[in-house]
Image: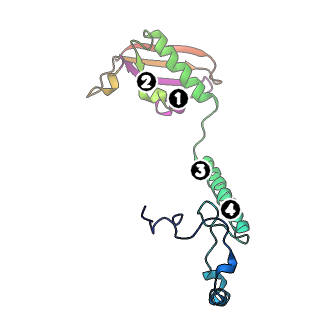
């Protein structure tokens, strides 16, 4: 089998313990004169280069610093995202499910894609003391994939501020 120069694990070195007394005095002299940075790192029993003891703390430090940077970066990203009221996603799901129920279930009706987004912000008409008012189109399954999309129904649903109750369905019918 040919040995690959690209794979450091496949070297011409013997793996396992090596009898150091086999080397010549010249080899020992040349190793002593070499700067410590250019000495070759010994191989483990598995053919991989061993990490010297003085590099282990540096590896731990690098791993810790990387983890800390990732954590701090993700905290900033979370803080930068606009926050929704906790009740808004619940209210949107409740409004969508009411429309599905009123219009024959999922076998015959699908709400607009905006109602499947977290919080349905693009379908939210208003948020007030009365609650969340959602307005959206709907139609038979696949209506949004048609070119152009052909919705058949429009629905407006008012949900309580806590997102727990349907207060009213002001409109559910053909598109005016």
Instruction: Measure how far apart labels 3 and 4 are at the Cα level.
Output: 18 Å
Q: Upstream in the sequence, badge 4 or badge 2?
A: 4
Identify the residue shown where x is 62% and y is 68%. 43
Which residue is the site of mark 2?
Answer: 136
User: Callout 4: few (<14), some (14-19), or many (20+) C-alpha neighbours within 10 Å?
Assistant: few
Residue 161 in the image: state x and y as whole percent. Answer: 63, 24
The magenta stretch is: 118-141
The mark lying in front, picked from 2 and 1, is: 2
Q: Upstream in the sequence, badge 3 or badge 4?
A: 4
Q: Is residue 132 visible?
A: no
Which residue is the site of mark 3?
Answer: 77
Instruction: Measure how far apart labels 3 and 2 are at the Cα level.
Output: 30 Å
Which picture quadrant has residue 152? top left
Is 175 situated above or below 63? above
Q: Upstream in the sequence, badge 3 or badge 2?
A: 3
| The label number, if any, that marks residue 126 in the structure image | 1
The mark lying in front, picked from 3 and 2, is: 3
């Amino acid at each position: 089998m040919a040995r690959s120069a690209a794979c450091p694990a496949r070297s011409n070195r013997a793996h396992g313990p090596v009898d150091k007394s086999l080397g010549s005095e010249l080899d020992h002299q040349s190793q002593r004169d070499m700067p410590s940075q250019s000495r070759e790192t010994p191989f483990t029993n598995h053919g991989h280069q061993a990490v010297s003891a003085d590099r282990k703390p540096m590896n731990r430090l690098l791993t810790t610093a990387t983890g800390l940077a990732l954590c701090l970066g993700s905290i900033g990203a979370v803080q930068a995202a606009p926050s929704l009221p906790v009740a808004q996603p619940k209210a949107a799901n409740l409004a969508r499910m009411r429309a599905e129920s009123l219009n024959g279930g999922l076998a015959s009706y699908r709400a607009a894609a905006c109602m499947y987004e977290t919080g349905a912000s693009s379908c939210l008409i208003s948020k007030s003391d009365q609650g969340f008012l959602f307005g959206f189109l709907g139609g038979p399954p696949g209506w949004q994939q048609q070119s152009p999309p052909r919705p058949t129904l429009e629905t407006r649903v008012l949900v309580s501020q806590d997102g727990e109750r349907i207060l009213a369905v002001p409109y559910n019918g053909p598109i005016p």
